[in-house]
Amino acid sequence: MLQLATQHSDNVTTIWCKGRIVFGDDLHRLRVATLSQNTPEVILDLSSVNLIDAAGLGALVEVHKRFQCAGKEMELMDPTRFVSHVFRITRLDTVFHIVRTRQIAVTLANRRKRWSEFVQPFMTTLAVAAGVVVSSAGVLIDSAVRSRRKSREHQPRR
């Protein structure tokens, strides 16, 4: 039996699949659940799928084609070792975009690292610039105070 659970976030729908993706009514439910999503991207989490047969592979290929025709994306996430092996021997690993949670974490970490590499010099430059402005303002204030003192010193006293 195939169990499905759906979660929506932003422009992505994740459908968790648990059990077997095999010929039968469950396969029809998977097609309907996947194709009925309105988000531009659907992720099928296959981390709890213990069996997939030719009908299951055919259904995934069909859904993938429909998504492509509609300008949407479908990704397969964290397939089990068995499912990964089936994708490899059928060469479907070259058709589907397959991601691993670890890859996502590494990608996000690299994005944060690149962002901090950009932000750090920017913040340093900003701090230096602010220091120069404050310093320049201090010099200007000191100059104005001295100038005012001098003008008072040269004015006749009443």
Image (cartoon, rainbow, N blue to C red):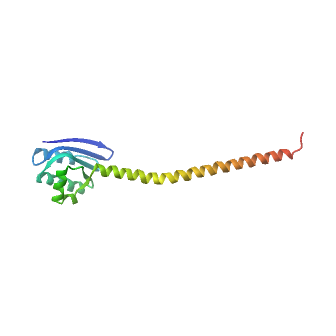
Q: Residue at x 59, y 52 (%)?
A: 129
Task: Residue at the far left: name it.
Answer: 24
How many numbered dots are placed on residues in this image? 0
Which of the 4 quarters of the picture holds residue 7? top left
Residue 59: x and y, percent? Answer: 15, 52
Location of the N terminus by quadrant is top left
Q: Residue at x 27, y 45 (%)?
A: 13
Task: Residue at the far top: name it.
Answer: 158
Horizontal arrangement in the rendering, residue 40 relative to residue 66 (left or right): right
Q: Residue at x 26, y 45 (%)?
A: 14
Pick whichever, 107 or 66, lies toward us. 107
Horizontal arrangement in the rendering, residue 93 relative to residue 136 (left or right): left
Pick whichever, 78 or 143, lies toward us. 78
Residue 60: x and y, percent? Answer: 18, 52
Pick whichever, 76 or 47, lies toward us. 47
Q: Residue at x 22, y 56 (%)?
A: 96
Residue 124: x and y, percent? Answer: 54, 51
Residue 147: x and y, percent? Answer: 79, 48
Pick whichever, 108 or 102, lies toward us. 102
Location of the C terminus by quadrant is top right
